[in-house]
Amino acid sequence: MTILLLGSGGREHTFAWKMAQSKRCSRLFIAPGNAGTATCGENVALDPLDFAAVGQFVLKNAVEMVVVGPEEPLVRGIWDYFQETDALKNIPVIGPSKAGAVLEGSKAWSKKFMERHKIPTAAYREFTSEGVEEGVQYLKQQPLPIVLKADGLAAGKGVIICQSHQEAEQEFRDMLDGKFGAAGDRVVIEAFLSGIEFSVFVLTDGKTYKILPEAKDYKRIGERDTGPNTGGMGAVSPVPFVDETMWQKVEERIIAPTVKGLRKEKIVYKGFIFFGLIEVQGEPYVIEYNCRMGDPETEVVLPRLKNDLVQLFENCAKGTLGRVRIRADKKFATTIFLVSGGYPDQYEKGKIMTGLEQVKESLAFHAGTRVQGDGVVTNGGRVLALTSLAKDMESALRKSRRNAKVVQFEGKYYRRDIGKDLENL
Ligand code: AMP
Ligand code: GLY
């Protein structure tokens, strides 16, 4: 079948790489893609948020399935656009409806959803500009640190962990004052949970769900988890401390009630659910939901997945996921991200990349790259993910680190300590 994949990051290169391996995929378009996706299929200059243009492309090129990588088209309702357009409504879109994507699109909504379905998460209150003073009073009574979350999508920057009441009050006022635009019209004030985070993913057809391998990502720019947050500096899968007992709790208390809750509320959801979890004294809590796969987690999850991804998507669309058994490689997968100097603040693009052809024993998934002439240049903050598989985590990490040295571009930076915190748990 002919497939259109929307997105342009490392997650999408990994999707494209995996789908291109399927016999069921005869032609693959990626919009807009990057230099890596161009090696798996055909990049097309389409904006994933321009639904009319996407729809026209689908019809003109006889696309039979659309796979949505990032959250924004989903939160804005690409699934609904296809449903509401006669010529498009029979073309499956892998991803939730707008009503389902609100799990990620509104933090206040997702907190209420968890409350309704008794899913463990941090205690919270929500406020709008009408309740500023009440919110400030509430803040003053909370123990430190205090977590503030802009309700809507804020490009991963909408969560602020405040170490003093003064900072919390200022941030709270700034958010309601438009610091994050309309995303901050509503603010969630949440209790801080102290523990170790991990990510769990399911693919659901709305009836049943299939659990994919778990992962842990590394968000901070600096080694030992210091400095500002980034889009992700690396990831590992599996996560050693997520044992049988933890899995059982996660499935019973979190995954099953989430899928059941969506169904009960008649919310159409055929796609990925990403559970951002935290373990606090042996108990799992939900930090956040996302309506898509994670990045950089995809770069370690899909290389471990033995199933045909296109077949899984077909089952998801048809509502026959119940027939499927997920098979995961027992090996460890690790990924290390090469990023541009200065990221996540100011950085330069257009740096020539060398050494790609010398990468051995790792997969090089492109994120911020583009083709220029015969070569590849950097085109973003997070540039290239080097994924390796091995029998143990340390051997996989060694391969990723070796190849992180091999690929060169001016200003390259990466963390050498990915996975280190898990060694002595
Ligand atoms: P999010 O944008 O929702 O992914 O949040 C970004 C990061 O903020 C999470 O990955 C956590 O590290 C942190 N975070 C969010 N909520 C909490 C919380 N209630 N307690 C502790 N850390 C949190
Ligand atoms: N790695 C976190 C995310 O994709 O949101």
Image: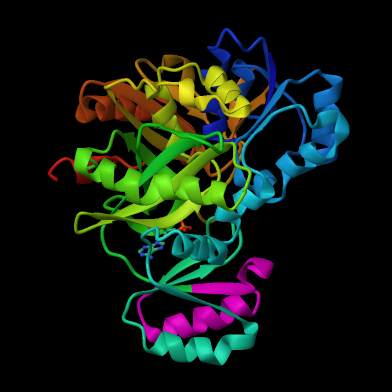
Stretch of the chain drawn in magenta: 162-188
Task: Please tell me how many numbered marks the rendered image carries.
Answer: 0
Q: State the image coordinates of residue 182 (x, y, percent, origin top left).
A: 68, 68
Image quadrant for the N terminus? Answer: top right
Task: Point out the image quarter for the C terminus.
Answer: top left
Observer able to see residue 51: yes
Percent coordinates x, y for residue 321 in the rendering: 51, 26
Identify the residue at image location x=63%, y=66%. Answer: 183
Left or right: where 52 falls relative to 289: right
Q: How is the image coloured?
A: rainbow
- Residue at 60% x, 21% y is 314
- The reply to whether the magenta stretch includes residue 164 is yes
Side of 60 relative to 101 (left or right): right
Q: Residue furthest top?
A: 23
Residue at left offset 32%, top offset 79%: 144
Give yes or no for residue 161 being in the magenta stretch.
no
In the picture shown, does residue 237 fall above or below 170?
above
Q: Is residue 28 above or below residue 228?
A: above
Closer-to-camera residue (379/141) = 141
Q: 140 and 334: which one is in front?
A: 140
Q: x, y percentage for residue 290?
A: 51, 49
Splitting the image into 4 quarters, where does residue 402 fall?
top left
Q: Nearer the viewer, residue 89 or 40?
A: 89
Name the spot of residue 220 as percent of width and height, x first: 38, 53
Name the residue furthest front. 264
* In this view, 175 is above or below 399: below
Question: Does residue 35 appear to the left or right of 220 in the view shown?
Answer: right
Quadrant containing ligand 1: bottom left
Is residue 341 visible from the viewing direction of this image? no
Q: Residue at x 27, y 38 (%)?
A: 239
